Image (cartoon, helix red, strand yellow):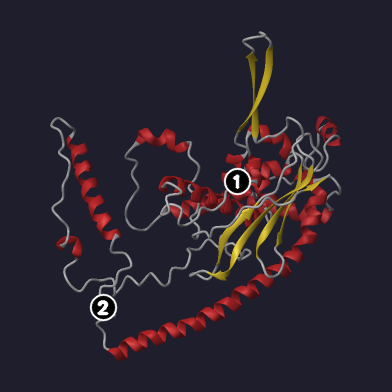
Amino acid sequence: MTDKGSIPIGPNHAAAAESSLVAPTPQNTPLNTAPITSGLSRPTVPDIPEGDDEDEAKEALKGAMLGMVQDRLNTLIGRSSGYIESLPKTVRLRVEGLKGVQTEYKKAQAEYAKELIELDRKYLALYQPIFNRRAAILNGEAEPTTEEIKAGEEESLKDNPDAEPVSETEESEEDAAKAKNMKGIPEFWLTALRNHMEIGAMIEDRDEDALKSLKDIRVEMLEKGKVGFRLIFHFAPNEYFTNEVLTKTYNYLDELNYEGGNTFSHAEGCKIEWKDDKDLTQTVEVRKQRNKNTNRIRIVKKAKATPSFFDFFSPPTPPDEDAVENGDMEPDEFDELEEKVDLDAQIGEDIRDRIIPRAIDWFTGKALEYELDGADEDEGSDDGFDEEDENDDDDEDDDEELPAPRRRPQKNTALNDQGECKNQ
């Protein structure tokens, strides 16, 4: 699962590989001398030229040795040491019997997953009146009641006991005049999305005007018989596109993976109906060309793809697992595409599980406190070792990199069809 207690249709689980993996102990524990000591050839380490720094020479030697050992260890993963095969037949039959018992657990687990999905459907329906009320207030269609304001101020005091309740503050004439021209809460969703680390990195300055017209974001589960969810972005009329609604659908495999979750399959975006010269995913290069014979000049426009938040609605297609083996894709290209798919799935689940349910916390920034606390807990450890920064020269480059996406299960190849978006 991406988040405990969230809709369990987008888990962050590893794909099942039960038939090819075996337990590391005891059957992967060799009975004889470990082959990495008895089977390795004499290491060949590049000579270290004289005059090199002594520390650099040691690090080069250490790196070479570790690399060779790791390569050898990688070839041993999943291999049986012969322990199970050496057991008496009676004991091996018990092992097979335990595998049969495990199948009963899988059946119960599958029923559990189905009931969770139906429970999610039930409560998602119960959330809708709450989300409707939120949308009415932030879009200026209604004002919060006295009871709602009081409950909100009590929450604020829990976070900061020294804070002065907004209802007890005085409003200046200047602020009162500004409020008359403000409808609801301006730029609510733009601010909430910007405060999410990965999504904020996707939003370009050019995208902001279009995202200011974002009125609401909703989520719905796919119809029965399908596993997944759909994100629905509602927009007010704007100068960039004619769509009133943009959608993004995330599909998952129906069968459970090894850890009991549904494996992500593929995402489907929708076509954005851009107005003339308003496509935020492209820049237009204007060039002048002179005819050699007539000496006349013509203007040539060439569209060029440029990063934009709205690329979110044109998701990457998961790569074929055999693409590298078949020679259709280089390993680096495969890994890069898979990371893009991983990040896209992660962002979709974060919008569903974090941003939509707690949009006000992302708008105020309160959610960031919990996100940062969680990151600190993940980085901390009790292994007795302190992390050292051995390469300060890379700090500047590292700051520019996006956070590494949370790894997801292996993907199944699926076509990325463009869905229909509603127009005005």
Tags 2 and 1 touching, CB below 8 Å: no
Residue 137 appears left or right of 386: right
Image quadrant holding the C terminus, namely: top right
Tell me what residue is drawn at x 48 percent, y 47 percent: 404
Query: Which of the numbered marks, if any, corresponds to residue 196?
Result: 1
In the image, residue 121 lies at what x, y percent? Answer: 71, 68
> Closer to the N terminus: mark 2 or mark 1?
2
Q: Nearer the viewer, residue 184 or 317?
A: 317
The answer to whether one can see residue 293 in this image is yes
**Tag 2 secondary structure:** loop
In the image, residue 19 lies at what x, y percent? Answer: 41, 72
- Within 10 angstroms of label 2, few (less than 14), some, or many (20 or more) residues? some
Quarter location, residue 38: bottom left
User: Is 83 situated above or below 409?
Assistant: below
In the image, residue 204 lies at what x, y percent? Answer: 62, 35
For the residue marked with disc 1, what is the amino acid?
His
Query: Which of the numbered marks, if any, corresponds to residue 152?
Result: none
Which residue of the protein is positioned furthest toward the bottom in this rendering?
90
Q: Nearer the viewer, residue 195 or 124?
A: 124
Quarter location, residue 7: bottom right
Q: Which residue is mark 2?
A: 83
User: Is 266 situated above or below 403?
Assistant: below
User: Is 37 situated above or below 347?
Assistant: below
The answer to whether one can see residue 162 in this image is no
**Tag 1 secondary structure:** loop
Per the model, the C-alpha gap separating discs 2 and 1 is 50 Å
Tell me what residue is drawn at x 21 percent, y 37 percent: 56
In the image, residue 117 lies at what x, y percent? Answer: 65, 70
Q: Nearer the viewer, mark 2 or mark 1?
A: 2
For the residue marked with disc 2, what is the amino acid?
Tyr
Residue 343 appears left or right of 119: left
